[in-house]
Image: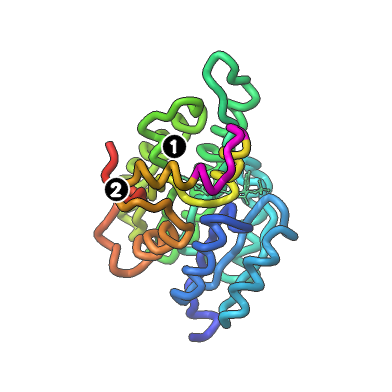
Amino acid sequence: MSERSQRVAVVTGAARGIGAATALRLARDGFAVAVCDLEEAACADTVAAVEETGGRALAVGVDVADAERVESAVSRIADELGAPVVLVNNAGITRDNLLFKLTEADWDAVLGVHLRGAFLMSRAVQRHMSAAGWGRIVNLSSTSALGNRGQANYSAAKAGIQGFTKTLAIELGRFGITVNAVAPGFIATDMTAATAARIGMPFEDFQKFAAEQIPVRRVGRPEDVAGTVSFLAGEDAGFVSGQVVYVAGGPQG
Ligand code: NAP
């Protein structure tokens, strides 16, 4: 495929975890991939992994909650890689605490990255999608959207992502753009390792405990989420929009 005809995908928070696996998967699917994370240098491993498989990738340092940096990052991606037509809003943080101990800073930080970040990135990238008459936005929600002790900020953000997804699906459908959310359950990444560390449990034990509550009796891998994103980003999902797909090893809700 020539560079000019290759579709371009943007994945935020792609230095590691689910974002890195998704960037690799989309590259395997034939996309050129903008690997975005807070620090450009942190994206080097993911870019190298894409290039090892013969794919094209660009490392982009961007704080998704910063409007100016988002605008310049998306312009740079369009100039250096091509106009983006797939966006995976994956960047995320947790700042867990029970409500009575939850600070305003931790509330704002979590809503800032997940909700403001998804808004700013989607607003910037949809211009290119509308111009192309084709686009796919996939937002990372979570089973925590349904409520999770100690995560009032995170669950509010992840539930907000679901409303945001459905509204964008309604607004952007006429331009050939679908918008869906993927809501993972327990996925073994640095994020869940940090949760284990915070509660003082070895990560192995934490995963074993989690697996016992999951119908398929295992925790998720980043590739489980990447596979679902791959479907939603592809041609076959053109009539699927405004949906929340739980990737959690069992039913939710
Ligand atoms: P992770 O391993 O912690 O990776 C998240 C990535 O996002 C990190 O590289 C992080 O960079 C980056 N990031 C944080 N703030 C950012 C910002 N403002 N701008 C750009 N990048 C930023 O997390 P993960 O487990 O792969 O999770 C990925 C997504 O899936 C998140 O939205 C998360 O909420 C969601 N999710 C995860 C699980 C799970 O069980 N792991 C379950 C449900 C949903 P730094 O390293 O510099 O902070």
Query: What is the x, y in percent for residue 135?
Result: 40, 61
- Range shown magenta: 198-206
What type is the residue that disc 2 sits on?
Pro
Q: Which residue is under mark 1?
A: 158
Sort mark 2 into few (<14), some (14-19) or many (20+) by Cα contacts within 10 Å.
few
Q: Nearer the viewer, residue 87 or 212?
A: 212
Residue 119 visible in the shown view: yes
* Secondary structure mainly formed by the magenta segment: helix
Decide: marks 1, 2 in contact (CB < 8 A)? no
Among all residues in the image, which is located at the extreme top?
100
Q: In front: 165, or 222?
A: 222
User: Which mark is nearer the camera, 1 or 2?
Assistant: 2
Packing grade of label 1 (10 A; few <14, some 14-19, many >=20) is many
Q: How is the image coloured?
A: rainbow
Residue 27 percent location from the top left of the image: 51, 72
Hey, which residue is sitting farthest right in the picture?
41
Residue 56 figure quarter = bottom right
Is 146 in the magenta?
Answer: no
Q: Mark number for residue 215?
A: 2
Left or right of 106? Residue 8 is left
